[in-house]
């Protein structure tokens, strides 16, 4: 199983999620979705189960588009398979400008309120610690990659493997409607919504996320 984090996140995103191994943590540091897909594909040999959160799942959609035969299972968490909107492109450009001018902490702070269902100082601190580990250079590369996204719904439709779509009911960044649309495209879908969670549900409800993953993995051959 290859775990792929979201933007400004690293392996700490999964620290409380107890899932069966072996597990490989992939990095997404390339300035394009295609480059990120290559990073994921090079993390392991042969078929694998991909579990991606947010931007990590978007890079996973590109893996599905390029090499669907490599995927034994695909779990898309808190994400959006659609092409970026003009508002998103403008927002990412503003965050890039701010970061380039030395305002990385401010940029991360602007993102922070959209990460969780409720303000929680402990969760906020965990996110900011991860963000500082990622740093401004990789953040700018991830923002550049966001602008290279496409509509990935056709790629999902081309998958024959089991597809788990997992989201939080209180995710304001990627609401449940996005995930219903993803599940509707998959040939072999499972959709699960955690009622108390926002965007980074593996931090908010790690036990519940782990239970959903373990149940789904039983269907993987």
Image (cartoon, rainbow, N blue to C red):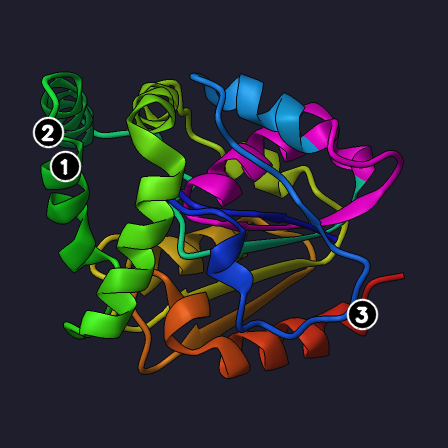
- Residue stretch in magenta: 41-70
Q: Could you say whether the residue bearing mark 3 is in a helix, strand or loop?
A: loop
Give the mark count.
3
Residue 99 in the figure: left or right of residue 43: left
What is the CA distance from the residue labelled 2 to the residue labelled 3? 45 Å
Marks 1 and 2 in Cβ contact (< 8 Å): yes
Which residue shows up at 70% across the image and 42% down it? 159
What is the CA distance from the residue labelled 1 to the residue labelled 2? 6 Å
Mark on residue 219?
3
Q: Kindly indicate the quadrant of the structure image that contains residue 127.
A: bottom left
What is the CA distance from the residue labelled 3 to the residue labelled 1? 40 Å
Marks 3 and 1 in Cβ contact (< 8 Å): no
Q: Which residue is mark 2?
A: 103
Q: Nearer the viewer, mark 2 or mark 3?
A: 2
Quadrant of the snapshot with the C terminus: bottom right
Q: Which residue is mark 1?
A: 107
Residue 196 in the figure: left or right of residue 27: left
Q: Nearer the viewer, mark 1 or mark 2?
A: 2
Measuring from the top left, give residue 204's x and y in whole percent. Answer: 37, 74
Q: Could you say whether the residue bearing mark 1 is in a helix, strand or loop?
A: helix
């Amino acid at each position: 199983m290859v775990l792929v984090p979201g933007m400004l996140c690293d392996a700490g995103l999964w620290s409380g999620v107890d899932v069966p191994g072996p597990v490989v943590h992939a990095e997404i540091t390339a300035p394009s979705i295609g480059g990120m897909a290559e990073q994921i594909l090079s993390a392991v040999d042969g078929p694998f189960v991909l579990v991606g959160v947010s931007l990590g799942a978007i890079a996973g959609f590109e893996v599905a588009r390029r090499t669907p035969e490599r995927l034994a299972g695909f779990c898309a968490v808190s994400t959006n398979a659609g092409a970026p909107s003009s508002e998103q492109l403008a927002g990412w450009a503003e965050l890039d400008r701010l970061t380039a001018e030395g305002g990385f902490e401010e940029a991360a702070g602007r993102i922070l309120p959209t990460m969780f269902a409720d303000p929680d100082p402990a969760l906020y601190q965990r996110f900011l610690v991860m963000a500082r580990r990622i740093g401004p250079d990789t953040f700018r590369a991830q923002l550049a990659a966001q602008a290279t996204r496409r509509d990935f719904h056709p790629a999902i439709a081309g998958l024959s493997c089991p597809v788990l779509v997992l989201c939080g009911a209180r995710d304001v960044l990627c609401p449940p409607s996005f995930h219903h649309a993803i599940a509707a495209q998959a040939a072999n879908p499972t959709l699960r919504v955690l009622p108390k969670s926002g965007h980074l549900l593996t931090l908010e409800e790690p036990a519940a996320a782990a239970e959903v993953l373990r149940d789904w993995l039983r269907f993987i051959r």
